[in-house]
Image: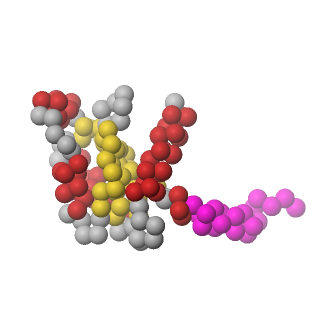
Amino acid sequence: MKRMLLAAFACLCAAVTLAQDKDDDGLKYFVIQGKPKPEVINMMVENPADPMPAARALVASIEGAKLVDYYFKVGSAENLAIIAVPDSMYAAAITYQRMGSELMEEMIVYEVIPARKVPAMLETAKAMNEADAYSKSE
């Protein structure tokens, strides 16, 4: 199960990276995973439609935000939205708005780092290792 979650997370990170511009846009990227209530799932089945326009409009209501991509998980009735927002507060706002709308049973939000930013992150971790007095054996 852990391997499947790690593989899914890696695929989402790759999707975020592929969907982004090459320049640093200053946005923070989040994966929002939501589990719709059964009555919402029934409504979706009875009225099939592309969910992308509604999701895009919701995210676009935040100035500077964008919906990077939107997925449905196979094997569980859950949605995965990859969003780019100016600040983590906006990812929280989307979560609270959706939970308050009584459409979702639960939601989980993950901040993800685009692959193009990983080398700088690893350099920072390396510098921290070099400065970490606690991890050095004397």
User: Quadrant location of residue 107?
Assistant: top left
Q: Nearer the viewer, residue 86 or 37?
A: 86
Is residue 123 positioned above or below 98 on the image?
Answer: below
User: Quadrant location of residue 40?
Assistant: top left
Residue located at (35% from left, 61% from top): 84
Residue 35 falls inside the magenta stretch? no
Where is residue 92 drawn, in percent x and y? 32, 57
Question: Dominant secondary structure of the magenta stretch?
Answer: helix
Residue located at (47% from left, 40% from top): 8
Where is residue 48 drawn, in percent x and y? 15, 35
Q: Which residues are magenta?
A: 118-138
Where is residue 90 drawn, in percent x and y? 31, 62
Residue 137 falls inside the magenta stretch? yes
Quarter of the picture containing the C terminus is: bottom right
Work out whether residue 83 can be spotted: yes
Where is residue 54 drawn, in percent x and y? 18, 51
Furthest-left residue in this view:
47
Is residue 123 positioned above or below 2 on the image?
Answer: below
Whether residue 121 sits left or right of residue 35 in the image: it is: right
Q: Nearer the viewer, residue 49 or 76?
A: 49
